Image (tube, coloured by chain):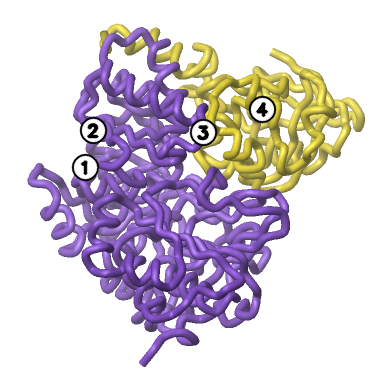
Chain colours: A purple, B yellow
Amino acid sequence: MGMTSTEKILAAHAGKKVVEPGELIQARVDLVLGNDITAPLAFAEFEKTGAKRVFDRDKIVLVADHFVPNKDIKSAEQAKEMREFARKYDITHYFEVGRSGIEHALLPEKGLVGPGDLVIGADSHTCTYGALGAFSTGVGSTDMAAAMATGQVWLKVPESSKFIYHGSLSPWVSGKDLILFTIGQIGVDGALYQAMEFTGSAIDQLSMDGRFTMANMAVEAGGKNGIFQADHKSLEYFWARSSRPYQVFPSDPDASYSNIFEFDVSRLEPQVAAPHSPDGKKNNVRGVSELSGQTIDQVVIGSCTNGRMEDLRVAASLLRGQKVSPNLRLIILPGTQEIYLQAMREGLVEIFIEAGAVVSTPTCGPCLGGYMGVLARGERAIATTNRNFVGRMGHPESFLYLAGPAVAAATAVKGRIAAPQEVAQG
Amino acid sequence: MAYQGTAWKYGDDINTDVIIPARYLNTSEAKELARHCLEDLDAAFVKKMRPGDIIVAGSNFGCGSSREHAPLAIKAAGISCVIARSFARIFYRNAINIGLPILEAGEAAERIQDSDRVEVDLEKGEIRNLTRGEIYHARPFPDFMRELITAGGLINYVRERAGGAAQ
């Protein structure tokens, strides 16, 4: 019996030839990640282990991104704790405000994750790096602390489900639409504890940014990780950012899957997830045409899901020469400082500001209702973020829709949920 | 170890944003977090519940963020145990790692009604519904996880086993 790429990566990191779904393993980690919300808890637990040093100062990454630049005094204390821990243990990859970004946009950009790596992070969207053919998954702060001390993590080998996407995507349809559609089909626990393997001709054509978006939201279906076969696109992405060794672990043709889903996505239109979950059981994920007309108070384009260059370029292509609807606010957050700078060089920031958008420094802020765009009671927003749970972006009686950057930008112009074609010129 | 308390029953997909909203995540102080436990799902929960009470829910309990603040808030509020049909995986890890007792028990999750008196025997994995006179069984923990629980959570386990190597 063959193995899936997830099983091969886990076996290699557990020092085994073969692993099977359900097996509990102790695995060596290549990278351990924490942010300003989860890392302070991990530091306290790390000190309790009695360890005098971290297992490898080059393999721990600390990124303050949720509430920085500090939103209040308590957040400032948490950011300070990170800075001090990084100094005390001489952590190589500590990213300071101004030289940083949203963690899951930042780590691949800096070449810190490569094909075949095993990465854990105290953030649920750590599954993003599966786009590069790595195994990466979210854990809690105590897991992060134990891994910082020992370089190891306990994992249950997940079953794998394969998702095959046939056909070619229509204009304005992106990785976000594929993953929202998928969650709508299988449900928010449709891949509970499982590895989600994404493949097919539509995936081959998908950009790296689109793949990051898809892997990022594997957790929204309950998945342990999302993974793509490393191909020339992911290898070129990695080679441009790192010269270190890596390993490609392709799934065997006779590997075993608990489920195989096949979708023809040629005629898929841009998708929108209605409040308060992308759950298919509630028929919450629909084509944009079914929801167009819904008035909106705020649009957010950014986050670890959709704050990359391609996302900003798509938004700019629709906002060029247009004005944000007078009844609505548009907030745009480039994912990293490098993306921000590139967007300036390409003239995108100018397009956004001339349209009437606010363009902010990279932060997770509004995605989790922290700051930089919190909603009032009764307000409705559409965002390119990853969760629309009750109260996620602010007041528990606010309403959040999820979509890709094209629908978000078109909505900002129209003041209501709109299809990109309604705004696109030429 | 046995617990007895009143059941607070909720539905499927109870997520970490309603267990502890992110607006309170600028601290990791457990007592502070406990004051806002389940606030966006049931605003009066913290006032109504009594120490030792038990949360009973459907499938995918604790889905969403990796925030360990969620099980910490539940534990510090005084909840003795969470029973659900299934748990989201990061929440499951976190609960075990910090020592919040959790039980996967489909029949219990279905049969127990809000306000029932419930007794839980963690070692036997037995759940007794005192109001209805019924007994349910939870899925047993794998041996490795039992070791973690016996050691008092992951950090104690690391200190005992690997702490020396990390010095």
Distance of label 2 from label 3 (alpha carbons): 25 Å
Q: Residues within 10 Å of mark 3 (few under 14, many from 20)?
A: few
Q: Identify the secondary structure beneath mark 3.
A: loop
Side (left or right) of B75 relative to A192: right
Distance of label 4 from label 2 (alpha carbons): 33 Å
Q: Identify the secondary structure beneath mark 1.
A: loop
Q: Nearer the viewer, mark 2 or mark 3?
A: 3
Q: Position of residue A280 (x, y in %)?
A: 61, 65
Q: Residues within 10 Å of mark 2 (few under 14, many from 20)?
A: some
The amino acid type, in three-letter code, at marker 4 is Ile
Distance of label 3 from label 4 (alpha carbons): 25 Å
Residue of label 3 = A72
- Counting residues from the start of the chain, the first of labels 1 and 3 encountered is 3
Q: Position of residue A188 (x, y in %)?
A: 57, 55
Q: Chain of mark 4?
A: B
- For image coordinates 63% across by 41% down, the residue present is B61
Residue of label 2 = A93
Q: Nearer the viewer, mark 3 or mark 4?
A: 3
Tell me whether marks 4 and 2 sit on the same chain: no
> Where does the C terminus of chain A fall, quadrant-wise?
bottom left
